[in-house]
Image (cartoon, rainbow, N blue to C red):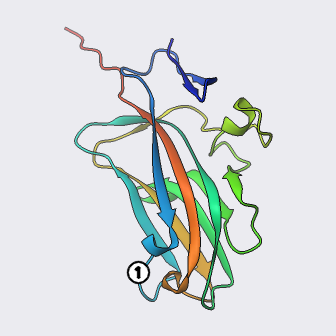
Amino acid sequence: MTDFTVDGSVVENLGDVVGGAPRWLRFVAAFSEFDAPGVTTDTVTLYANPSSPIILIDAFFNLTVEFSGGTVATATLSIGKTGTVDALMLAEDVFTGAVVGLKNDATTKGTDIRDDLDMGGGDTKLESPLLVPAGTAITMTLVTTIGDTDELAAGSADVYICVAEPLLTTIE
C-alpha cells in the first residue's frame, strides 16, 4: 500500500497501482496564459505527458484572483485531458464575485482534498486513479461569455495534479 501526504495529512491510499512515489505538480494559470485572440474557449497544456503513461491520482485548483476584464460577462475553468476539457474536473466559476479558494466539483470528478485536510467542502474525488496514456496532455480550459479570453485583465489559479508512475509487471 502506498500512502502520500500533503502538509502531513494523509490524502489517499492507492493500493498496489503505483510503481513510484506519487508527486504533486503545481501550475499557475494566470489570465495572460489564455491569450488566443477572438475566442471564448481557450485551452492551455499544464502537463505534456511524455513517452510513458502516468497515473493521475487527483486534480484541483485554488482560485487566487478572480478573473475579470474587458466585456467578459462570465468565466469558468475546468481541468481535462487531450480530447475532453472537463475529464478531470468540471467547470467552476472563476469570474468576479466567485469565492476565492479551493475549487472542486460536486461529481465524481475533482478532489476530496478539502475534507482530507479538514477544510470543509464536498466529499468528491476521481472515482479511481486514472491511467493517462503516453502522449496525452493534462489541460486547463477557460470559457468566457460575451467577451473573448484575451480581453481578461486579471485572474489567477494555482492548479494541482497528483501523478505517479504506473506499476509495471512483466509476465514471462
Location of residue 4 in the rendering, given as x and y in whole percent from the top left corner = 53, 23
Callout 1 secondary element: loop
The residue drawn where x is 69% and y is 84% is 73
If the image is split into quadrants, where does the C terminus sit? top left
Q: Is residue 142 above or below residue 68?
A: above
The quarter holding residue 166 reads: top left
Judge the density around disc 1: few (<14), some (14-19), many (≥20) Cα neighbours within 10 Å: some
Q: How many marks?
A: 1
Left or right: where 93 falls relative to 153: right
Location of residue 31 in the rendering, given as x and y in whole percent from the top left corner = 51, 72
In the picture of the structure, the residue carrying the numbered disc 1 is 36
Q: Is residue 92 above or below residue 119?
A: below
Q: Nearer the viewer, residue 131 or 11?
A: 11
Amino acid at dot 1: Ala
Q: Is residue 169 above or below residue 147?
A: above
Q: Nearer the viewer, residue 152 or 76?
A: 152
Location of residue 15 in the rendering, given as x and y in whole percent from the top left corner = 52, 16
The answer to whether residue 38 of the structure is visible from this angle is yes
